[in-house]
Image (spheres, rainbow, N blue to C red):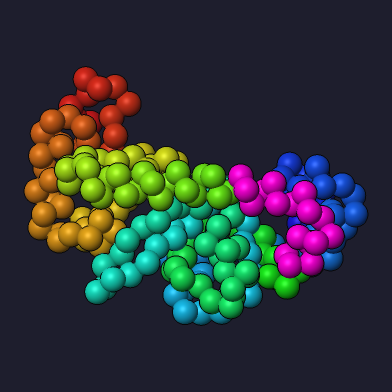
Amino acid sequence: MADMINNQFILEKFSFLGEDFLNEMHANAVITDIKAKTEIIREGQKNKYVPFLIKGSIKVFTLNDGRELIYYYIKPNDSCLMTFSSIFTDYTSRVYAVAEEESEVILIPVSVIHEWLIRFPEINKVFYHEYDKRFSDVMNMVNDAVFHRLDKRVLNYIKQQISATGNNPLKITHREIASNLGTSREVVSRVLKKIENEGEILQTKEGIKIPVNENVRSV
């Protein structure tokens, strides 16, 4: 990807800003690979870059007494709104971000983003779009936590992970699910058994699977 200006992701997301902006992108942005389970930013750390995800999946969350509260997942063609919002204050992250799988990102220095907001004001359309998506994600998370029973939350989480990674079956442990939903492994194991008996999932050696056919009960 030596010729960044011709990168398909950049052309699709930013070409509406014109050739001058694409040249700026070419001069300032960096494309990099991130290994799965790698921490990208942590709460309290100074943000140096705003990431845009080309491929992979990134989990954005906070920690409370060692338990994770997931805000949203960044999917390909998206950015991290929480990272972007920090550039208007003290550049300090209020969240953790971890690559869920091997990912490829474009990193843009926050100082450059500041300049672009003035020189290329239409770039705000990109961030307004991100804000709308992330606000919906957080509202869905709150609704899940407040109004849905744990079995519904577990099933929604599994479906969300399969959608984000494209992996069905999904290779994930009961402990990981428990940590992400703020409960215990034992409780998650009981819930998974219950929804498996109801035919919502299949637990196999390859991982947890959502049957393509609702009538499927076994592999």
Q: What's the magenta region?
A: 113-129
Is 36 one of the magenta-colored residues?
no
Q: Residue at x 40, y 50 (%)?
A: 138
Residue at 47% across / 65% down in the picture?
Answer: 97
The one nearer the camera, 90 or 173, is 90
Residue 92: image location, x then y, percent? 54, 76
Q: Most prominent secondary structure in the magenta stretch? A: helix
List x then y, in percent, for residue 6. Answer: 82, 49
Residue at the location (80% across, 42% down)?
A: 16
How many numbered discs?
0
Q: Residue furthest right?
A: 20
Magenta span includes 125: yes
Residue 12 visible somewhere in the drawing: yes
Image-based side of 3 in relation to 8, left or right: right
Q: For residue 36, say whether it is visible.
A: no
Quadrant of the drawing holding the C terminus:
top left
Give residue 151's position: percent from left, percent from top.
Answer: 17, 42
Is residue 66 left or right of 11 when viewed as pictured? left
Q: Position of residue 64 (x, y in %)?
A: 28, 71
Q: Quadrant of the N terminus?
A: bottom right
Return the residue nearer the eye: 78 or 190: 78
Q: Residue at x 28, y 45 (%)?
A: 144
Q: Nearer the viewer, residue 60 or 7?
A: 60
164 and 215: which is toward the camera: 164
